Image (cartoon, helix red, strand yellow):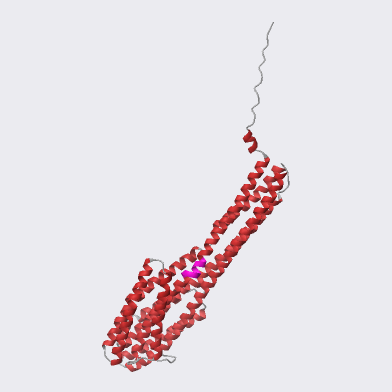
Amino acid sequence: MTVRTFTLPEPLPQPNPARRLGSSTPLRLLAIAVGLIAAILLAGTVTAFTVGERRQVLSDLLARAEPLSDSVQELYSELSVADAAASTGFIYGGVEPVEVRERYTTALSEASAAAALASNGMEDDAGRESLLLISRQLPVYAGLIETARANNRLGNPVGSAYLAEASALMQNTLLPAANSLYEATTERVGNEQRMHSGRPWPAIIAVLFAVVVCLAAVPYLARLTGRKINLGVAIAGGTMGVALCWLLVAGLMSSIAATRAVERGIDPLDALTDSRILAQTARSNETLGMVRRSPEEDVQFGPLIDQLREHLDGIDRSVVPNEQLDQVTAVIDEWVESHERITEALLHGDFSAASGIAVDPGIGGSAALFDRLDGELVALIEDSRTNLRDNVDQATRILRGITQGVVLLSAIAVLAVAFGMRNRLREYQ
């Protein structure tokens, strides 16, 4: 008898419960919901952080950096005004006119006030040291001017020596210190403005990622659940698409406003401020040469005027109207002609005629022409500062709208995803 043996088949492997659970449709739906909500929340968070930080920097620029730069510019300018007015007073001989004296006193007072304002917002040590140097040396300068004025009233020739010493202190110590302050604060404003004049790319990329994820999830969910479309996820994708368009358009508008602040504010403001300082320095050299009754004393007048013209020629004519710059150039030309007449009179030993031209308040007088030039430059400086502040303020307001809009749309998208996925998950209960 033959005995047959049978081999029982091996039992089929049982699926891993954890793996079976992980491949279940409800859990997939839940994972997709969590992923979509995370992507949307990430987009809103990145937008709020990136745009909010940029808006804070621009707000800080308006509230602190730009006023500090303006105070330093005022300090720089008023020191030059004081030096030019002090030198002008000596041309009259004896006691200078009240308006010239008041111009000097006012300029010195404004410079002290500007230094005090600048010290409140100055954060770096180098800036504080420059302000401390100015605060210490400004009374020394004023004392030299008063000594020179007292000797001038008495007719002592040593008065011109004290004036020259005071002017040297101003030109070699006070103005360079103010200039270094001005360059540092202007560079800070310009750098911060240029750094934040581009589009908020991190926010754009984060929102774009959320849009792509939502739109990619729509067909996948349709295949997974056998439905044509998940309305909630589709609404979330559309909502984030609106947020992306808002971010692109508003970001572009903010970028344009920030760029305008640089092109129409910072760049011309820098050139015009330097031009005004050059004009003040040229006037100081002109009057100092008059005081010493020697045209050789103002040898820097010509080079300073050349630098002044270069600064004005470098200004974009599309930013500052041609008519205004042409008017400034015309006044400079008249001033140079007046200066040449002063030089010619001094070369012929006619100090009376030279001083008459130098202090003549009439149309062709050097003093009147310089005052006109200074007034034109001050008006252009104020226009540039207004353009800077207006464009920065506009960029800040646009950024505020971006933050609020994208955060609101992100919240709507999260609710839409939660609603759309909730209905699908309830079908498996």
Split into 4 quadrants, where in the image is the C terminus?
top right
Q: Is residue 197 above or below residue 269?
A: above
- The spot of residue 355 in percent (x, y) is 35, 91
- The spot of residue 80 in percent (x, y) is 38, 80
- The spot of residue 223 in percent (x, y) is 70, 43
Q: Which residue sits at x=63%, y=59%?
A: 408
Q: Is residue 64 magenta?
A: yes
Q: Which residues are magenta?
A: 58-65
Horizontal side of residue 274 vs 346, given as left or right: right
Q: Which residue sits at x=58%, y=62%?
A: 251
Residue 235 image-quadrant placement: bottom right
Split into 4 quadrants, where in the image is the N terminus?
top right
Residue 248 is at least partly visible in this image? no
Residue 120 image-quadrant placement: bottom left
Q: Is residue 258 magenta?
A: no
Residue 297 image-quadrant placement: bottom left
Q: Is residue 272 above or below residue 362?
A: above
Horizontal side of residue 272 vs 26, given as left or right: left
| Outermost residue to the top | 1
Horizontal side of residue 71 vs 147, given as left or right: right
Q: Is residue 233 above or below residue 175?
A: above
